Image: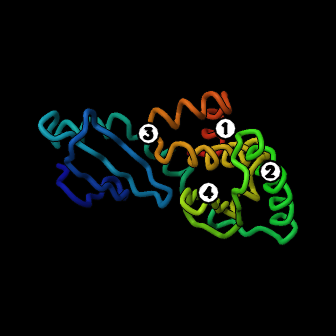
Amino acid sequence: MLVSGENIIDGVPVVTAARKAKNIIIRVKPDGTVSLTIPLRRATFAQGEAFLRSKWEWVLETRKRALSAPTPREREFSPMDVARLETMLGRLHAQWAARLGELGVSWKLRRMKTRWGVCNFAKRRITYATMLAGETEQSVEYVVVHELTHLKAHGHGPAFKSLMDSRLPDWKERRRALGK
């Protein structure tokens, strides 16, 4: 029987929590930990465990892939890879800033662990992650447009999504390619 907190099922750590949610949610994290969210007042821990066990084959396969795949922050890029990215970013950033009327937006490149880019709209400065060096030009272009769009829409709400739809119609596919 599962309890709130850490559980072990067949040698696999499973963190279980009852939270405000509509559905039972199973997530497999990059470190191989499985999280199970059970909706408060909508399901019991027994129902959550039954659901998890019905998906156990998927959990094990997804966990195996997660544990064997290098994460972007584990990859090291050569100075040549970073220089290629810097050239690509310079070109894409300038093109898109001009196209969107966002002139005077500075940018820099730095190592980040969890984000592809960050927009400081107050300073009109965008920071891109060096881990983009391992991505395709289409993916890098998505990140450039995404960050420039934050100058007009600060969050990820409907206004942001509407702007992204008009600026880069295939942005959702590009985001998926990045693993977001």
For residue 57, which numbered disc appears in the image? 3
Q: Earlier in the sequence, mark 2 or mark 3?
A: 3
Residue at 57% from the left image edge and 50% from the top image edge: 65
Label 1 belongs to which residue?
A: 174
In depth, the one of 141 and 63 nearer the eye is: 141
For residue 94, which numbered disc appears in the image? 2
Tags 3 and 1 touching, CB below 8 Å: no
Secondary element at image label 4:
strand
Give me the C-alpha separation between circle 2 and circle 1.
20 Å
Eye-nearest disc, 3 or 4: 4
Give me the C-alpha separation between circle 2 and circle 4.
16 Å
**Residue 81 located left or right of residue 45:** right
Q: Earlier in the sequence, mark 2 or mark 4?
A: 2
Eye-nearest disc, 3 or 1: 1
In depth, the one of 167 and 51 nearer the eye is: 167
Residue 44 image position (x, y, % from top left):
14, 39
